[in-house]
Image (spheres, rainbow, N blue to C red):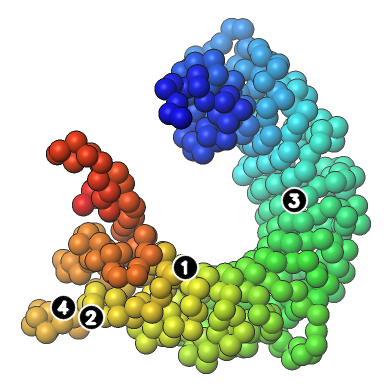
Amino acid sequence: MVLSNCHSVPTDIFYSILEHIGDRRDLYAAALANWDWNRAATPLLYRTLDTDTRARQRNHKSGSDVIHPAYTLLHRPELGRHVRHIRETGVLHATYPVVTVAVLRALRLCDNLYSFTWVDDTPASSTAFLSFLNILRGLPLRALTLRTYSDLGEDAWAFLNTFPNLQKVAIWCMNGPPRVLQYWAPLLGSTLTELELGRCAGVPATILVAVLSQLPRLRDLRLKGAPSSAIPDILTSLPALVALDTEYLGSGLCRRLDQDAPLPPLKRLTVRTSSVDLQGPVQLWAWLSALTPHPSLESFTLYAFSTAGHTNIPRYFLLSLARRHGESLRKFLVNMTQLTLEDVQCVCELFPRLEELSCAVASRDVESIARAIEKAHNLRSLKLHVHWIPDAADTESPNSSVCTLHSPNSPVTRFGMADARALMCRPGSRLCTVAMGPHIFRGSWVQKRGGDGSEQVHFQVVEDGSSGRRLS
């Protein structure tokens, strides 16, 4: 049966349709379409409230000089039940204390609040934060994110240590003593599944291990500044962990792990590191292999910076990774880390389920890249930072000895729309996203009406970049 109009569509599926709209302006337009769409779009419009405030002429009713969503909630209290996520900025409340009063009143109306984010980049801690904590303590809060330049103060931390039932905590406080849940972990052990600690530098490894071992339900962990030698011990105390984002600092010696150590089967591993050596920090590759001794890894991400240029990945590490995770790895994202075309070909052959690949590579032409990824039959996204090797014609130019990094303003254009289409349209290819430096090409099948009035399927490639969007 063909639905003739929107009134024929069951109203209970409108919400599922409209929640795929990412732009709030489009949601606002949908809310004005009719009453059915309004009832579905309104909860989505108020699901996330961000203090994206703007200066305005003084409003005599509110006494405020800024626009804040709290005033809408006070005007229409019934909307408070739709709010799930709130983000507040400390600088706003330090500048406009009258707004704080209204925001606190509105916060009490959000009785279904799931997450709260506090961002404050001012050098002095905000006294308003304690007022927010007093209200948040009585709400069904499940996620809390703190990103501040200054320390929150002992009173605030003492109060935070009484918050139970949180499932996600993210702490990024750049000043004051490092906060790693020393007194909070026992209360969160039965519920916490996601944790970010943005400042672990200076915390003894024994304290980190002792604290994190009290959080056995953790599934997603991000640590910044934690000693590399402590990471294996931390993992052995977290049997449910599936995602780890950490740094390799290269300080101290990493002891050899017991082959029978009960490490969790990680599915996503992200590592950030830097070095003065092109081969990467000492022991990095052995350390990475030791973290995932059993087949499990689906995504491997590496951000490696070297003062001597691009970091190179040794071939033996690729072979070791493939022996363990060849049948499971879907994402190999080493970004600016250098691979040879032979390494790229090796990755594509050793990981048959590979869907996303990102790396730096040197190549003479596009055909060489196409041959390197020929065996990646499941590849959907390819992101390369290419150093184009000068060909015979370029050697006659005065700058021929320098490889050219792909750029929209490069005098040597090596990759364009036609090349992206050719890579996507190869026989058996599933590639739909190709990024070369700052240029991103996306391909998709679209339906268009032909000249004879019939519907035809056409493969369309769209380029996103500084030069705008163009259709092929």
2 or 1: mark nearer the eye: 1
3 or 4: mark nearer the eye: 3
4 or 1: mark nearer the eye: 1
Residue 220 coordinates in the image, percent (x, y): 70, 61
Mark 1 burial class by Cα count in 10 Å: few <14, some 14-19, many 20+: many
Q: Is residue 436 left or right of residue 225?
A: left
Mark 2 burial class by Cα count in 10 Å: few <14, some 14-19, many 20+: some
What's the residue type where badge 4 is placed?
Asn
Mark 4 burial class by Cα count in 10 Å: few <14, some 14-19, many 20+: few
Of callouts 1 and 3, which one flags the residue occurring earlier in the amino acid sequence?
Answer: 3
Disc 1 is placed on an element classified as: loop
Residue at 86% over, 68% down? 213
Q: Are marks 2 and 3 in contact (CB under 8 Å)?
A: no
Q: CA distance from mark 3 to mark 4?
A: 53 Å
Vertical order, 216 against 364 (above or below) = above
Vertical order, 52 against 275 (above or below) = above
Q: CA distance from mark 2 to mark 3?
A: 47 Å
> In this view of the protein, can residue 357 be seen by the observer?
yes
The residue wearing badge 1 is 355
Q: Are marks 2 and 4 in contact (CB under 8 Å)?
A: no
